[in-house]
Image (cartoon, rainbow, N blue to C red):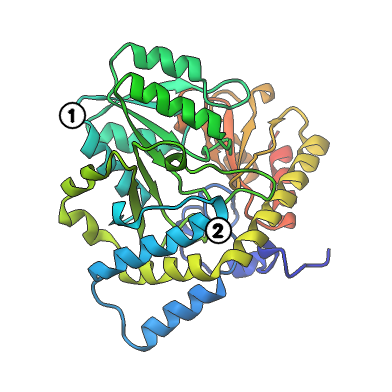
Amino acid sequence: MTTQPSAPFEALSLDELRTRTSVKWRMHPPDVLPLWVAEMDALPVPAVVDAVAEALRRGDTGYPAPVGGVEYAEALAEVAVARWGWHLDVTATSIVADVLTGVNEALELVTGPGDGVLVPAPVYAPLLDFTAAQGRTVVPVGLTPEFRLDLDAIGEELALGRVRALLLCSPHNPTGTVHTADELRAVAALAAEHRVAVVVDEIHALLVPEGTVFTPYLSVADEGLVVTSASKAFNLAGLKAGVIVAGARSRHLLERIPLSVTYGVSHLGVIAHVAAWHGGAAWIDAVNANITANADHLGELLAARIPEIGYLRPPSTYLCWLDCRRLGLGDDPATTFLERGRVALNAGSAFGPGGAGHVRLNLAASRSTLADAVDRMAAAL
């Protein structure tokens, strides 16, 4: 196969990738093909490399300055207008270490110990685990068979009066569902009717392919807290930074965020993320095109080698939710694929109700890696 410059996941060989020291490449022995944690097999945005290298050259490695939070929000605001036509209010933001820290802090602002938090599931496992560890009562509600928000079920649960907040993942991880503007308006209306706060994780917002419309929650709602970061879209998880954005009727909540919450942000992280937002438009377009091609390729591979796996092509993100229940591998097929096939996938059961018998697979890899993974999975059967 001829590697195209526009295919970011074809830039590095597997041997080159195995020199990395992040968790993706250190969690398992070297004979395991890692397609689990959400890290991309791509080189970074050139503007990020330049910005971080320049900061290191001039010794700019100190504590983050308060102005960094403003610059971070301003860079996001430029992307928001260019990508989604959303005019973000920079003054209604607060810098945080990362999205999970921001989600936890947002829940601290709108709930108390023991309060119920409604979470559509299956969903990104830390949203369930961290919320429970925070002393909140996680109340999961299922998705529809098409992996969309079950608005009727959400409304019924809210009407019971046992939750104080609704925690939403948009786009949804692990299914890749992109919530429509009408769905988000319906969520906002239900939350207002039942006096429930809404917290939204929008870390995958830029990982939406051309032709699919992403709607920022606060572009259709004036109340709520959104947490986001450049880390997921630009593969910068090791350079920590994130931001909480408040709706017009929720901005007063930001005044209660303790100063200590902002201390976890990395100064180099802010520099890297701002550079990515300013100079990464072409890079993210190439990544999304590569994801789309890989999603099609994976569908062909599975149809040919393991047609029993249920495959619904992900509308966004680079994460793929595979239904393995017809394989007869029980609730945890990921263990079988790891032990017999030496392929590391995420166990679906970790994503909450509805996850048993499923696995999550990372599409941000080369076509040859995906082909090898499917061959190994087939051999494991």
Which label sits in the foreground, 2 or 1? Answer: 2
Looking at the image, which residue is at 58% across and 30% down?
358
Looking at the image, which residue is at 75% across and 51% down?
293
- Residue 217: percent from left, percent from top: 45, 39
- Residue 320: percent from left, percent from top: 62, 40
The residue wearing badge 1 is 113
The residue wearing badge 2 is 82
Instruction: Say which quadrant the N terminus sits in.
Output: bottom right
- Residue 333 appears in the figure: no
Q: Eyeballing the image, is 246 above or below 177? A: below
- Residue 158 appears in the figure: yes
At label 2, the amino acid type is Ala
- Residue 18: percent from left, percent from top: 57, 65
Left or right of 160 in this view: 284: right
Left or right of 16 in this view: 311: right
- Residue 249: percent from left, percent from top: 29, 38
Number of residues whose C-alpha sits closer than 10 Å to that of mark 1, classed few (under 14), some (14–19) or many (20 or more) = few
Instruction: Say which quadrant the C terminus sits in.
Output: top right
Looking at the image, which residue is at 50% across and 59% down?
79
Which SS class for mark 2?
helix
Please tell me which residue lies in front, 253 or 164.
Answer: 253
Which residue lies most toward the bottom here?
58
